Every structure is written in C-alpha cells, then in structure tokens.
Image: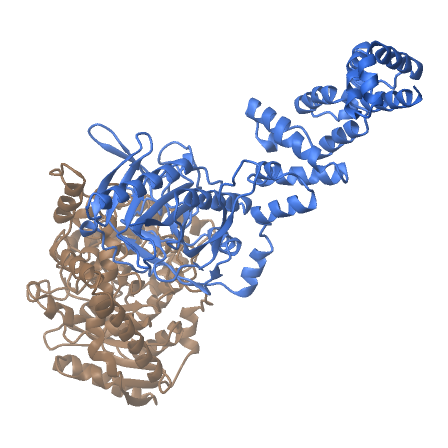
Chain colours: A brown, B blue
Amino acid sequence: MSAPLYFQTIAGLSAQLAAGRISSVELTQSVIARTKVVEPRVHAFNSFDEPDALTQAAASDVRRAAGESRGPLDGIPVGLKDVIAVSGQPLTASSKMLANFVSPYDATATENLQRAGAVLHGRLNCDEFAMGSSTENSAFGPAHNPWDLTRTPGGSSGGSAAALASGAAIATLGSDTGGSIRQPAALCGLVGLKPTYGLISRYGLIAYASSLDQIGPFARTVEDAAIMLGAIAGHDPRDSTSFKTEIPDYRAELKNRRGPWKLGIPKEYFGAGLDPEVGAAVEKAIAFYKSLGCEIREVSLPHTQYCLDAYYVIATAEASSNLARYDGIRYGHRSKEAKNILDVYQHSRAEGFGDEVKRRIILGTYVLSSGFYDAYYLRAQKVRTLIRQDFLSAYREVDALVTPTSPIPAFKLGEKSADPLAMYLCDIYTIGVNLAGLPALSLPCGFTASGLPIGLQLIGQPFREADLLATAHAYEQAHDWSKRRPAL
Amino acid sequence: MNYEAVIGLEVHIQIKTHSKVFTRVGAGYGHEPNTLTDPVVLALPGTLPVMNKAALDAIIKAGLLLGCEIAAVCKWDRKQYFYPDSPKNYQISQYDQPICIGGFVEIELPGSARNVMGEHKNIPLTRIHLEEDVGKLNHHVIDSLVDYNRAGTPLMEIVSDPAMHTAEEAFAYLTSIRNTMIYGGISDCDMEKGQLRCDANISIRPVGETKLGTKVELKNLNSISFVRDGIAHEIKRQLAVVAAGGKLIQETRDYDGQTGTSQSLRSKEMAHDYRYFPDPDLMPVHVDVAWKNSLRDTCPELPFDKQRRFLSEYAVPYTITSVLIPERKLGDFFEAAAKLAGPGRAQAVGNWIANDFLRELGAGKIALAAAKITPAHLAALVQLVDAGTLLNAAAKEVFAEMFATGEAPAAIVARLGLTASATDAGELETWCRDAIAANPKALTEFKAGKDSAINAFKGPIMKAAKGKANPKLVDEALRRLLASL
C-alpha cells in the first residue's frame, strides 16, 4: 500500500500529477488536512493561509490541463521559513518585533519557486531572527520534533524540518547561517542542503549574518533536494553577493556522477562531545563508501577549534548591524510607552526582541566598538580565512568531507535553553562550512536505539553541489532511512 | 601674540543620477513626501543594496577633475548610528579606503579691484568618498515627520586638508568646487535644494606653531555666504575666548546664518562611536585603468583653465571672463560666437553677453538653455556693427528683437529699416559743411591740431540725419572736408 500523499516525495508526486492520477488541489488538500491534524502537537507553523494555498493549487491544475506545466515542482506544496518574504503574507522572523508585519514584496527564492509552479503554503516557525539551534527562541513558542514531541526539531529552521517530517509539507525552505538547515534535517531524519555562499539569492531573506546566511532546501530524498535546488539557484542582480555560475541539471547529474570519490575524514570532527551512537552511525556510513570503492583518507582541519569563536564574533557583529533597522519607526513593534525618540528605540527594541537576539546584538555591538574592532572582528576575519584555507587544502587531496552533522541527536525541549554555550556547541560541526562559504548537506544515516534520527554531513567544494548531491544519492540508494516516517 | 586660523572643509555634494545609489527607484527633489521609495530605501526586512554604477562613474570623474589618485578597489563600510532619517540605522559609506585620495582644488582669492585677477592657490584634498544621503525630518509641535525621498541619493564627501586660513579662502574653495562639479555634470550644486552642503573644522594657533589647535566643527552652513560669515564669526569667537584667557573645547557648533550666531550642539565626550565595519552585502568593485581612461575622456576643461585660455586666446578683459566662466554653457556660448564673429571681435561678443544677454535672461528669468538667441546670430550682430552697417543704438534694438523672437539680426534690420543709411553722398556733404560753418571755434581748434575737436561737428550732423547717418562715413567725410579747408 502506498503512503498517503502528504508523505510522498516530489519525484513521486510530480509523476502522478503528470500522469493525471492526482490533482494539485487534491494533494494540497491532503497536506492541509494533515497539517490540521499534526500542527497542534508540532507547532511547525507561525501562520497558514489555506485559501491562498488552494488558489495556487487550482491555478497549477489549470496550467497542467492547458499543457503548460512548469516542471516537477508545479503543484507541489512547499513551505517557507518565516524569514523568507512572500508578498501579501506575514514575515515575522518568529519575533514579536515583526508579529504584525506583512511583506509587500517577494524574495527572489520565492519568485523562483513561483515560477516553477510550487504551491507556497505556510510561514514556518524558527528561532527568532534565525538565532538558535532548537526553535525555542521563537516568540511564538517552540516547534516539536515529530519523532518525539518532547524533543526539539533543531533550529533555527526547526519549523521547516518539523513540518516536512510530520507530513505538513512536501518540501520546505530554510536558511543556514551556522547549521540552521543541516542540524534540524539531521534531528528530523531529512535531507537538508546548505548551498555554496552566493548560489542562492539572499534578496528577501531576513538578514541575520549577511556573510554567512544562505537559503537552502529540506527534502525527503536527495533527488527532491536536487529538484528544489535547481529551482532556486542562480544569479540575481538584486543581490551583489550572488554568483554568476552555470546551473547544471542537478537531478539529471545524480545519475551522471558516479564516483568513486575520494572522501576525507576530518579528525577534529570525531573528538570529545560526539555521542557514541551518532559516531557509530557515521563510521558505518564511511564503511559503506569504502565498500563502494571510495578512497577514505583522514584529513586535518587544524583551525576547527576556533570556528565557534570566529563565528560568534562575525555573526553577532553583522547581526547587531542588520537588526538596527527594527526600530519601531517605519514598521514593526512600536512601544506604547515611548514619549520621545530615544524611548521609541529603547522600549520598542526591549519589548520586541527576545533574550537570545538581545544577547547577540550586545555581543556584536561590543566587538565592533572603537578600540575592540582589531582584537575581535578583524582577528575573527583573519581566522575565518585560515579556516577556509584548511578546507581548500583538504580539497587538494579529497573530493568531499564526511562528518557527523550534529554531535548529538534531538535533545529535550528545555534541556539546553538555559545554557547558551551548550546550545552553541550543537553547531560545532556545521559552523566551519558557513565560515568557509562551502556547500554541505545532511542526510539520514541511521537511528538511535530510542528511535531518533541521525544525520550524516557531506561537505563539498564551492559551487559543486552536483557532485555533493550525487555522493549523497549513492548512499541513499543503498539505505532506507529516508523512507521511514514518524508515527504521529 | 598673533594667531592664525586653520580651516578644513567637509563638503557633501549630491551626485546627479537617475536612480538612487543602491537601488533602482528614482532620485530627485521636490516630489510628494515618501514617493521616491521602495523596499530597499525603506530598509524593509530582507532587502539588499546593489551599487549604481553611474554614481561610481561620477565620483571617479570628480576625482579625476580634482587631480585625485583613484583607488584600485572601491570598498563599502557601514557607519552605524540610530536616527530616524536613516532607515537602516546605518549609512553605507567608505571608511578606510575612499575611492579618491589626495588631489587639490584651485582657488582664486579676491583681487585688489573687481577688474583685477586675484591670487590663485591650490588647496590640497585629503580624500573624496561616496556614501548614501539620509532622509529629511520635518519637526512639528508635537511630533516629527520623516520623508525618505532623499534617503539613498548618491552623496560624495570631499574632505580638504586643514589648509585654509581665512573665510575668503573657504568661500573661494567652495565656489571653485561648485563650478568644477557643475562643469563635470556631476551635480547642479544647488545649496537651496541641499545638493551641496558644507561643514567646517576651525581652529586657531599662534603664528609659527605647526600643531593644530582645538578644533570646532561648524555645521549647517547652508549657503556659500553663510560659510564665509560663519567661519569669520567662529574665528572671531575663538580669538575672543583666547584673548579673555579662556580655553577652547572640542565641540560641534550650529551656525545660524539669519542671526549670525552659533551655539554648541555637542562636545567631544558625546561624540559617536560609529562602529564602522565592511558592508557584507556589497562586494568590492575593482576600478581598472580602462574604466578610468574612459571617464577621463569625458572630463571637460576646468573652469580656471578655460578662463586662462579665454584671456590669452580671445584677449577679453578679466571682468568679462569672470562673468563667462562660472556657467559652463555661457562660456561655450561665448566661444562659439567669438569664433564665428572672427578675429578682433571677441571682446564685443563678450560685452554683449556680459551686459545685454545676461540682463535679458535675468529680467525674464529665462535659463540659458531656453534662450532663443544663438551664437551665430550674436556673431552676425557684432559683424554688422563692426562693419558700420548698424549703429550702436539700433543694435541694442536689434538685440532685443533677437532675444524675443530668435530671428537673425539681418532679417530684423531689414524688417525694422534700421540700416545705417548709405546716405546720399551729396546730402552728407551738405550737412558736414553746415556743421563746420556753424562752429568756427572747433574748426580753429582742429586746425591747431586738436583731433578730438572733430566730434563737435558730429552731433549736429547726426541730428540732421535723424540718427541714421553711418558714423564711419560721417567721420571720413568730415576729415576729407576739413583737410581741404
């Protein structure tokens, strides 16, 4: 018996849509009905516009009937993290600051998905302004892990992961600044891809740390991730940091690029703090690649120990500046207490931002202050260069790197929320990739004894997502982790 | 003890581009509030800046005009402070790597008289950088309103070395920058529209001292004469403080041009920490030699260079050149007309422009570009007068017609019958004889060698001719007759 529509893949559903066996309206209704069932327990959504989703689905069916289908994504319900702008829809960043903000414009990624015919539905929960690793920093309450509702789906794109894992979407978009796509993908048993910095336009993505942020897809399979990536990748004249590069047919390339690959195992990623069950699953995955004929080589990324420090200087510095615009003057939360201009700033921001956001703004303001810039920001940028060089020199020997995505499986909600440093350590294996601007993905590589998903991280070379996806695809074809669904 | 003032100016000039510096929405002045905005200007969540190449072209051109070194890389920084006129609460600017480095502004100080060229000097520049303008606050009784039309307009900041010593130098500096920027088509520099704004850093020190004294920044100098008056006032104020045994403090002062007074805005202790850092949203732009050369090709002759050339090539008086030079198109008009008029007639062309043409333009509040008169017509008019075909008084009338209708002078002369009559030779001789006979005293004087006595005969002749006699022919006829007597 086949799975319900809401649990199927883009590849499978698009074939059924193309064959006329199902309609987009039917599929979208299935996803909406499922959302209504699971959402009270998962809280993956900040808002959901049912009539709008059904209107888009109906339009897709009309296109298809007229022979004008736009490809594999046409008619597929795709959820967006609530930091990606959709014209006429709320854009809150899970913050009280933007609780009532409705975007008057579309992000480029949004336009690209619309052009591909996707049915955009729902604003997905996340940590406030994408700052966090558990979704517990959302002003609207945390999302829950569909595999164990007492646990976090990860973060910051926790809602994107939880919605997809629970069947409330067929694919979703998140954003990844230090691991915010890969870690939730790992914790929810999904494929999550963080593309090379510059491959996806950031126009319309609420900025957390501009030099690190990148939009990317969550999907049930590597093939679905390839389809999603193909739809959103490409140069955008509205983003000066977007790169002009040839976009291959990622889906077709899955079959064309067959390896065997030379894979590097960075020794710094297997030390203290790595959960034994996670470690064992990753070792098994490495052994599988070896069995495929891949050459496995230990490599060193000597500056790994500085990643977290460099990240929290650079990311907070940029965040302190990027979030200055939320001042209660033109839009967003404005304090009713304010009696003069200073009040407007102070009260609006004190009331509008949560603790973690305030912590990072203060940290970032400090490291950019006169007299501290050289010691913190400038030094962190130098360290960042060294970290990137670590990766690039490893790539002289190997094609890709294999590591755990998260040192631990999904943890209990509340377990780390009082200890920011413990929370920051969740990103220990993912942060270096952002600092180096590289592509990386997480894919399921097993489950713990208690039934929690484990993620394998593959780190690739700049703008070589096609190779990265093919490497992941080879593993996925031989394993059935991606076929499991949580009992919910 | 004798003191000298040391002055450095920070001049902000809006660059004239169609769109704003980091987004495509239009830039301009005088529109309904908040109509020149888009998601980027308003700093909506998720928006990003994209550099306007035309703005970078303009500032590089400005740098080339002022002899600056052009940096190989144009890099952007964020200058951070909270104020409602700044939508992002940071301004995209250039901190440690300005696009233009060094350079100088040639200035001319007032001469000993209006018709004497003053001393020329070069004022060295520190840097020129590009940034975005902010919005405008309008304060009302209980609240303030902000208009973001101006926000994001490309703005360049020209920073001089502390190398000026008098308010006159500062005035001349600002005038020269303005003329140069207008020549280059970089800005209209209309201070009333905020297209040119100026802050002055002023200090005093004992003559002979090389270290700078305590600096006061003077703000809101919003006309060129306020710059001169404000600086003069500030120098006087500082000298008075020191003379009274007081100590100057580093502060920012606001000058009120209406009352001629200033008051302290903030002291050094309250200075901002702008927390500059490189803007991660904008990639550095490489400026190669080919790019620079293509802009160099568009650079016009500088105003003072043109003035020197007019003086030597056309031998026009200094006073005329100082009228022709400030407005580039007026200088161009002169040069075109002078060339068409031919050798020896440039001064006449200059006179017509400096006197009649400018007066008519001013009276009708007409822009030069809208004037109906052409250089060819003016040249033709000068030639008619020079040939004696047209008398001066009649020429004035013809000019007024040319200005009003745009007709060629010959056509007007024919239409109005203003040709200096090629009078019947016999009639002219009769008038001359009558005039000489009527004035024996002048005849005696002329015979005794006083040449100017001849003029005494001309009045009655002109009267008899009802003003239509050709003065040249009258003069010739008189001399012929006088010689025969």
Q: Is residue B111 left or right of residue B297?
A: left
Q: Nearer the viewer, residue B360 or A178?
A: B360
Residue farthest front in this picture: B448
Q: Nearer the viewer, residue B262 or A191?
A: B262
Looking at the image, can residue A185 be seen? no
Quarter where residue A410 is shown: bottom left
Q: Is residue B96 left or right of residue A152?
A: right
**Could you tell me how many numbered marks the image carries?**
0
Quarter where residue A436 is shown: bottom left
Quarter where residue A102 is shown: top left
The relative height of residue A205 versus residue A478 in the rendered view (above or below) is above
**x, y percent for residue B370:** 61, 30
Q: Nearer the viewer, residue B423 or B377?
A: B423
The relative height of residue B447 versus residue A443 in the rendered view (above or below) is above
Q: Is residue B279 left or right of residue A356?
A: right
Q: Quadrant of the C terminus of chain B?
A: top right
Q: Is residue A191 left or right of residue B290?
A: left
The residue drawn where x is 75% and y is 38% is B344
Looking at the image, can residue B251 be seen? yes
**x, y percent for residue A300:** 26, 86
Q: Nearer the viewer, residue B458 or A120?
A: B458
**x, y percent for residue B398:** 72, 21
**x, y percent for residue B232:** 35, 40
